[in-house]
Image (cartoon, coloured by chain):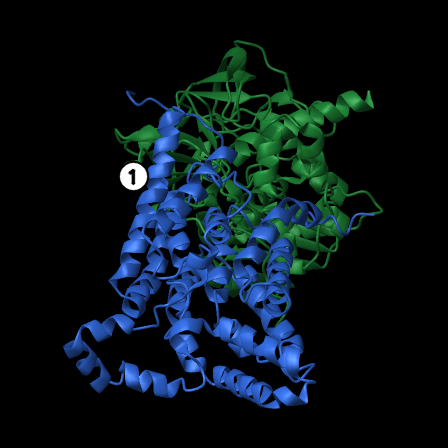
Chain colours: A green, B blue
Amino acid sequence: MIFNKQTFKGGVHPPEYKELAEHQAIEALPLPQQVIIPVQQHLGAPAEPIVNVGDEVKVGDKVCEAKGYVSVPSHASISGKVKAIEKRPHPVGGNVLSIIIESDGKDELSASIAPVPNYLAQDAAEMKKKIQAAGLAGMGGAAFPTHVKLSPPSDKPIDTFILNGAECEPFLTADHRLMLERPNEILEGVRIIMKILGCKTGYIAVEKNKPDAIALLQKLLDKSGDALKVVPLNVKYPQGAEKQLIKAITNRKVPAGGLPMDVGCLVHNVGTAKAIYDAISSNKPLYERVVTVTGKGIKHSKNLLVRIGTPFQNLIDFCGGITEDTIKIINGGPMMGIAQYTLEVPVTKGTSGILALTKAEAKLPEPEPCIRCARCVDACPMNLLPNTLARVIEYKRYDEAHQLGVLDCIECGSCAFVCPSKIRHIHFLKFGKLEVTKMLKSKAA
Amino acid sequence: MVNQLFVSASPHISDKDTIPRIMYGVVISLIPATIGSIYFFGIRSGWIILLAIISAVATEAGLQKLMKKPITVKDGSAVVTGILLAFNVPAEVPWWIPVLGSAFAIAIGKIPFGGLGYNSLNPALLGRAFLLASWPTKMTIFKTYPLQWISDYPRLAEFLSKLSLYKTAAEEKLSLSGIDAITTATPLNVFRQQKDIIAQFSNDSAMGEAVTNAKTAISQLYDSYGNLFWGNIGGCIGETSVFLLLIGAIYLIYKRYINLRIPLSYIGTVAILTWLFGGTEGFLSGDPLFHVLAGGLMLGAFYMATDMVTSPVTSSGRYIFGIGCGVITVLIRLIGGYPEGVSYSILLMNLTVPLIDRYTKPKTFGKADKK
């Protein structure tokens, strides 16, 4: 179809900087001396510690248990002794109860991790149970528990699965490398997902700036004959945002305040697909992931296979350290990532990258008055009015902010990126979302 | 670890465009028309533009210093206001006209509202309206006809006339036979006068000759597209050359400092309405191309209606704004008291911007599908 352009409204074209790390093959980071496993690495209820200080653990042993349905457990990522259970700084903010494990250097695997013969024969409910037990949460950044996403209510059947390999954040290349180096595992993960969902249509969405990954996946699919379609997408941020991705590929619009399942879609990140394969095929819990360590402030950009819980400092040291003019360390990409004040924070399940920005890149110019140029309005993929929202939130007019749809903001940062006045829209919008949620709660009460 | 780490909300990178970059981009886009104004009306227009810029910048800096506020003239917005104000005056105004106009634009049109970003009316147009209301004769007599200054330099005149870029006074008179180019000036003025003659006397058989003459004059105007396009006509110093204004506009669009929603809907509306109602032979007899090329429409549509601060932020709002400007412009040109209506139409539409923005709030992504 000529008119069904595979895109979405709005968006921006930030410089990509993918060249820093995209040709670096994934390297395993040497085992850290200690790991910090926060009980909260996912959206939902925090998990509960099930080990005590002094306990011996092996790689893959559960150290905290899911509390309720929208929650996942976490596992030891090295073998050794539990040294402490205390609050530690968390890369997403604040201090979070964490289990600190001191390495014994042996890296012994838990006995439960073993290949499962004929794993595709397991039934869907069994698989979902295993996925929760493996501690899977979305690895694209938001870290929503995977098993919940895989369990749509019966009145909302899912007919379309989309594998998200867009990786639209500048700098990050972890998903790209994973697609190049572990394509078979990812595809097997997709087959498992589609079996669980019982859906027939599957797409693999990759931005056109990764032609090698597109070609490789296409070649493998041609050989295997799967009914999956690789969809090369225009390079535009935020192409990998769930709602925008679904719109671009299926032309369906997820209703405001709704979820992809409302339009019969499900989106999973490539990293999650690989982890699903690991969990189903060998009962391997999510205790390691690929992290891109990059940015002009990093001496040697790399893609690293890292144990969950490894402090940022270890990764940065392995990459040659940071340059003197580095002023920002970010968990994630430059558009949505979270700036860190310490390098003691650990890699979590949602850490897709560690980015070091130099003074020149991470300038913080004083915001100037809005000149109503409307670039933010044109850039907003959710069709909001970021300039107006920022202003009403600044003046604490939360009722108005609610009417203007502040809760639909996906915090992609396109508005603040294009703003010539350097207004920090996301600062206001994040705050406004909190305040509006509070206001609604107190009204309901 | 010696680095001090900074923490702030995402995003951590931003586009390289800043307010000064945009404002000086607009200044760059106005350079062709500035050079054109000097070419057509002599070095005098250069002085007018310079005085207007100096006055605008000095007024802004002076007032901010007086109020002990940060001085923001470096952002370039006052320079843009100065140039646009100068573009809107005839070449032979006394030196204090651009000075007063710019000062008024900044001191009344911009600073009292809180400076850049907060004014609801386009300052340059407000300055022009002030000048037009206060010194109407100085602002509406266009004594200088294009390239007149060249006659002071006989050798240059001879040279240019060989290249057929210039016509000597004798040749000029000849080519504009029916119209006295020296006192009646702008094409829209001529159009207006002749149209009024036709309207007044078309049923009076005794005046048949006058009506015929008027009709001839208008059809001659319609044949002057070339002059209208290149700018070889009377008018305010910056508005005459459609060609040079379009060069600047293409630059602005290429740099994405403006988009086409307002200019296209504005110009399109003027074209359609003048075609429908602008003729002397009744419905559908108008000449849209003449109305689009004549007067200040190009300057207004590309450089002043698109002023970010005083136009809507929503996509559909900008179309409504452009259409509104077009309707008012045509009403003034065809029915109202002035031959030209671009500046008033934009000022009037500026006032509707908050309302337009309120009623054209875009539908949130996915909102339409919600039950």
Q: Which residue is mark 1?
A: A300
Residue at image coords 68%, 50%: B360
State left or right for residue B296 relative to residue A225.
left
Secondary element at tag 1? loop
Q: Residue furthest left?
A: B155
Q: Residues within 10 Å of mark 1 (few under 14, many from 20)?
A: some
Residue at image coords 57%, 80%: B287
Q: Nearer the viewer, residue A145 or A420?
A: A420
Task: Estimate the x, y position of residue A401 in percent, counting from the top left.
Answer: 67, 34
Quarter of the picture containing the N terminus of chain B is top left
Q: Nearer the viewer, residue A162 or B122?
A: B122
Task: Estimate the x, y position of residue B266 in percent, counting from the top left.
Answer: 57, 64
Q: Nearer the viewer, residue B370 or B89?
A: B89
State left or right for residue A196 relative to residue B132.
right
- Asked whether residue A361 is in view, the answer is no
Tell how many labels.
Answer: 1
Residue at image coords 35%, 46%: B99
Displayed quadrant of residue A73: top right
- Asked whether residue A217 is in view, the answer is yes
- Name which residue type carries label 1: His
* Image mark 1: chain: A
State left or right for residue A193 relative to residue B252.
right
State left or right for residue B256 relative to residue B281.
left
Q: Residue furthest front?
A: B206
Task: Estimate the x, y position of residue A254 in percent, counting from the top left.
Answer: 71, 49
Task: Estimate the x, y position of residue B126 in percent, counting from the top left.
Answer: 50, 48
Residue at image coords 62%, 89%: B208
Residue B357 vertical placement versus A88 (above, below):
below
Residue B189 vertical placement versus B286 (above, below):
above
